[in-house]
Image: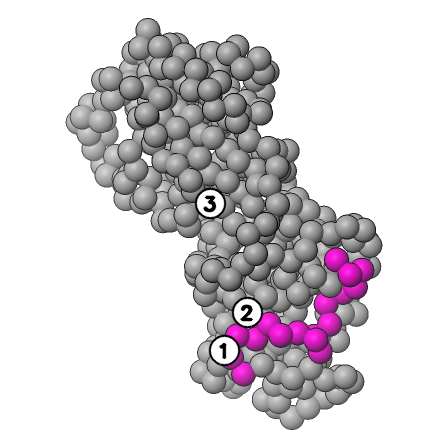
Amino acid sequence: MTALRRLVVEADGGSRGNPGPAGYGAAVIDPVDAVTLAEAAEYIGVATNNVAEYRGLIAGLTAVKELFPDTPVEVRVRMDSKLVVEQMSGRWKIKHPDMKPLAAEAAGILPASSVTYEWIPRAENKHADRLANEAMDAGGRGEQWNPAASTADLGTTRTPALPEPPSSGPPGDAAAGAAKVRAAMAAARPATAAPPADPVAAPQVGWGSAPDLGAPATFILLRHGETALTPEKRFSGSGGSDPELSETGRRQAARAAEAFAAQGTVQEIVSSPLRRCRETAGAVAARLGLEVRVEDGLRETDFGVWEGLTFAEVRERYGADLTTWLASPDAAPTGGGESFAEVAERVSVARDRLIARYTGRTALLVTHVTPIKTLVRLALGAPPESLFRMELSPASVSTVAYYADGNPSLRVLNDTSHLR
């Protein structure tokens, strides 16, 4: 019987613009000897970060299958994309139409029982990240990635590129296997449209980076003003009543409007569809002379039958469900509410759409506690339990900037100085 082969796949993808010129990178690594057995990278034209991440995963798993077609394998996939890791692990539902076929393709390459997924910080995914950036750089030159010119290996023993891939090699010959994978993937790769004539240059990151990454999409996140339910700390989501602002809430909205008028930075206004946000956004829009665009993805969590109840009342009536909900982002409130994982998925989709629309501009996003905390959490790469560790006051302001290299920057959290 052929011995089980344990492998690591590191994969990454990026988009300079999101959507914009995009590419992926993947490496197959022997974890025992830290030897890179295969590398893959490709410029894929204009796409989003999420699409590029999935394409990197598919390339990595395909490389494993090409390397060991008749050998049982145990593959640990390591990626810095929380979305891909959680969706492929089955913990997050896949709702976006662009993601479903990619996830299905990835799931069909190897037996599901042989692949596990692990999220890692971006700093631990440098090999695949460098491959993805090399692919995007090549696309900017009107070329495809050339393994012979790659410098992506960071700390592992990299398989040398071979000018003529041998048709066969002895068992365990990593160089021959890697070359066969590269040749097979290159032959199967579809033709890619020519890249834009003036692509975005590859940004350097870290302390030595150049300061100019272009003007980011800057989101000023304004929580709506108080409603009658706010001081009583009752669950108020999108599944129950749609309360209006209280007198206090209207005063808070007016003060926020005056502060934004004094700053003169807001160029666009986007609101959750719920009344308390539209009223808050309307007060700012009237003061600034701007229109309000409604984005459904910014609505609050649906809290099911907990809507309108206090925490203590939910604890008394639905104690077991509440305990499960507090312990797991996949757990939904009683009665068909939304889990935090589901909210994170739709907020991520809305975020990407808004980043593409407002690159280089400052947009005021008037929304709720959970969407704002989720945007902050995702920007920091923090775990789901961090949602319970942030304070977010009514009519408070938080700010996140999203740069062209895909890196977000949290600038402000829970600022209420304009209300004093």
What residue did someone put label 1 on?
155
Q: Tag 2: residue type?
A: His
Q: Main secondary structure of the magenta part?
A: loop
Question: Of 167 and 288, which appears nearest the observer?
Answer: 288
Residue placed under numbered mark 3 in the picture: 409
Q: Amino acid at mark 1?
A: Gly
- Rendering coords of residue 6 (x, y %): 48, 77
Q: In the image shown, does 310 or 111 lie closer to the viewer?
A: 310
Q: Residue at x 51, y 62 (%)?
A: 208
Choose mark 3 or mark 2, whichever is in front: 3
Camera-side residue of 277 and 291 = 291
Q: Is residue 94 left or right of residue 136?
A: left
Position of 121 relative to 361 (above/below):
below
Q: CA distance from mark 2 to mark 1?
A: 9 Å
Q: Position of residue 396 (x, y in %)?
A: 36, 26
Mark 3 residue element: strand
- Outermost residue on the top side: it is 247
Q: Residues within 10 Å of mark 1 (few under 14, many from 20)?
A: few
Q: Quadrant of residue 150?
A: bottom right
Disc 2 and disc 1 in contact, CB within 8 angstroms:
yes
Left or right: residue 176 versus residue 117 is right
Observer able to see residue 270:
no
Q: Which residues are magenta?
A: 140-157
Residue drawn 69% across the image and 59% down it: 136
Q: Secondary structure at mark 2?
A: helix
Any mark on residue 127, and which?
2
For the C terminus, the image quarter is top left
Tell whether 301 sits left or right of 64. Answer: left
Name which residue lies at 46% across and 20% down: 262
Residue drawn 39% across the image and 28% down it: 397
